[in-house]
Amino acid sequence: MSDRPQNDAANGSGPTSLQTRLNPIASALTGDGTPRWQRFLLLGLLALAIVLPFLVGSNRWITLMTVVVIYVVLASGLNIVVGFTGLLDLGYVAFYAIGAYYTAIIFNQVLKVRFGVDIDAYWWLTWVNFLVGGLMAAIAGVLIGYPTLRVRGDYLAIMTLGFGEIIRIIANNWVGLTRGPSGIPGVPKPEFFPLGIPGIPKSVFSGFVFTSQISLYFLGLALALISLWCISRIVRSRIGRAWTAIREDEVAAEAMGIHTSRYKLLSYATGAFFAGAMGVFFGHYLNYISPSSFMLMESFLILSLVVLGGMGNIAGPVLGAVIWVGLQEWLRDFPFVQAHPEVRGIALGLILVLLMVFRPQGLLGSVRVKLEMHPQSKTEADHERQVWSDVGN
Amino acid sequence: MSELGQQLVNGLMIGCLYALIAVGYTMVYGIIELINFAFGELFMFGAFITIMMMSDEMSLFGQTVGMPGLNFFIAILIAMVVVGVMGVVIERLAYRPLRNAPRLAALISAIGVSILLQNVAQSIFGSQQVPFPDIPLFTTAEGAPKAFEVASIQITYFQVFVVVVTVIAMLLLNLYVKRTRMGRAMRASAQDKSTSALMGVNVNKVIALTFLIGSAMGALAGGLYGGVYHAAWPLMGFNPGLKAFIAAVLGGIGNIPGAFLGGLLLGVIEALASAYLPMGSQYRDAFAFVILILILSFKPSGLLGSTVSQKA
């Protein structure tokens, strides 16, 4: 069986090959079209993600890995909008904030403060909140995406940038709802097996609360796996192919009968959903929410992870998140970096510019994205000579 | 009545600064259809370089370095030239290689440049506010701004200066684009780059010039903004940059008088809204986006713009 590196995830609708049957887990995670080595990379990372917490056991490592898992989901969600649909979303962290604030407000501001309910009795709401928080973020995504449909896609960048700031301004100023800059403490920890398992006495499981770092980490990992599985299926479906068509040529896509407005809105909503759901996790994970977790820089960081790993590629954002968080942790011990925290921002900016100019498909780029991003690979001299094709639209 | 007048004066002045930055956005977007996020950061560099040129010494990279201590007017001109060149260099390195690529690539590159410049500024000038030196012409001996009163509205000389400079700059720019050969080349390139190139227009040169002018205007706005708020800081460019883009959209993107009108309107609306709406001052930065949503919903071509075609 030969490898099929040309296909990317959005294109993988061919017949199931032998190797796909041989590694069903990887194919479930990434889809048929992902090159084999990338699937094994993902499998390797997954194995590491499961085994490593037991090997190292230190809380610092587990916290670090939880951070990676959160960024994996955020970057994968943003990848739907930026990588697969080709639209720039610069306020992605706002959807994350919506999810986090939603669950914190429901538990603390509404149930506890308003109704005086013992929130520990309603811990099962957490599980509902993953969905509702995601849906609220999705609705917000549609609402801010809608005005940009009549103009070109790049207005979305400005709209989302502004929306991200507005959400933060509201979180800072609507003190009655969000407690302003001081944030909302005491978001409860989730519990496991809310309804028990039939046939097994409820008392065996219902007492399991996610209090230890390691149990929360595995909850996050499970959410990440579910998200990756969903995303890889969506982008291989008819919807995903429509998104890719919009990315490649919006006018042609429309001519082929794709309702571009509808699919763009669907893309914003889907991307936002995963951020919202992960925001709910973040709220329960930290037990504390404040506007300072949702700065603009976070949105840029998530975008950089997608670009670094490879846009339009399921494995890309995962690798991007692992590399970036790892790199940051490694750099943390250098005195120079400690004295100059802005080095981090300089690195982010450089990553974005250099990758766009020299390797727009990212580290794990698909050939398709590469061809799209640099349509004519010409030498610099050709560029100068052929002025008019250089400036042609 | 006098409070209303005061808000109008303040709004008008901020609006002028938005308009100056909006020129860059509108000209660049008009020709290469790129939202150059970096204009906000170039604006910030304009303020810092003006301060640098005016001071006797300044702390750079944590080291105190001697500075020329020039007059404000010369300092701001130097800032315009330096930042203009920065704009051209950015275009050459970060945008020109991507001219054939999808817009997403150039947009991501633009946001990268913006993040990069912001953090480089933090690295050079520190993350704290750097005070703006007093300008003798506009400051009394006690250090207070010179002002006069019309119908119990306080107007400082510096505010008048900002408005006058903006109006002159706008008029000159409009004349340049309408009357000169290069201006005609710009308008031609905005309509159709390939055909202009066939007619002998050096489109790359036109685009570089557009970046030069846009960045210099941004630097001018930055120097003035620093003078108004008596400080410069690395993140100062973010909000004015965004709002200037919104001003450009409001006036009609690609249209220089539109950028002026959009900037003034945005400044005035923002000043009035933050003064008279409940909680207005806290939500000051949100109004611009409400305006953007309204304009995109009802008149996407902007107030003075012609119809925007959805070119792919």
Image: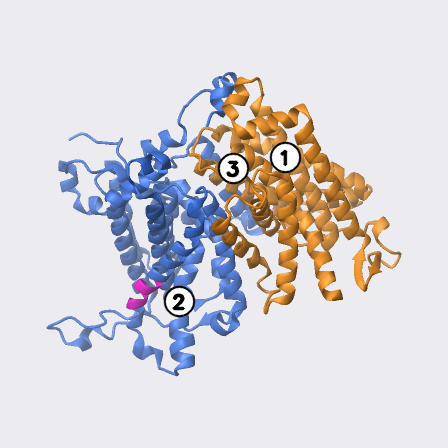
| Chain whose colour in the figure is blue | A
Q: Is residue A130 magenta?
A: yes
Q: Which mark is residue A102?
A: 2
Seen from this angle, which residue lies furthest bottom? A116
| Residue A245: image location, x then y, percent | 31, 37
Whole-percent x and y of residue B169?
A: 72, 39
Instruction: Give the amino acid at mark 1.
Output: Met
Mark 1 chain: B
Left or right: residue A22 versus residue A58 is: left
Looking at the image, is A174 positioned above or below residue A1?
below
Instruction: Please say whether residue B7 is one of the residues in the magenta stretch.
Output: no
How far is disc 2 from disc 1 in space, using C-alphas? 44 Å
In the figure, B266 relative to A153: above or below?
Answer: below
In the rendered image, residues at marks 3 and 2 fall on the same chain? no
Front: mark 2 or 1: 2
The chain under label 2 reads A
- Give coordinates of residue B62: x percent, y percent: 68, 47
User: Which chain has been coloured orange in this picture?
Assistant: B
Report, in whole angstroms, how far the alpha carbon at label 3 lies from the one at label 2: 35 Å
Q: Amino acid at mark 3?
A: Leu
Pointer 1 residue: B86
- Which residue position holds label 3? B34
Is B77 left, or right, of A142 in this rendering?
right
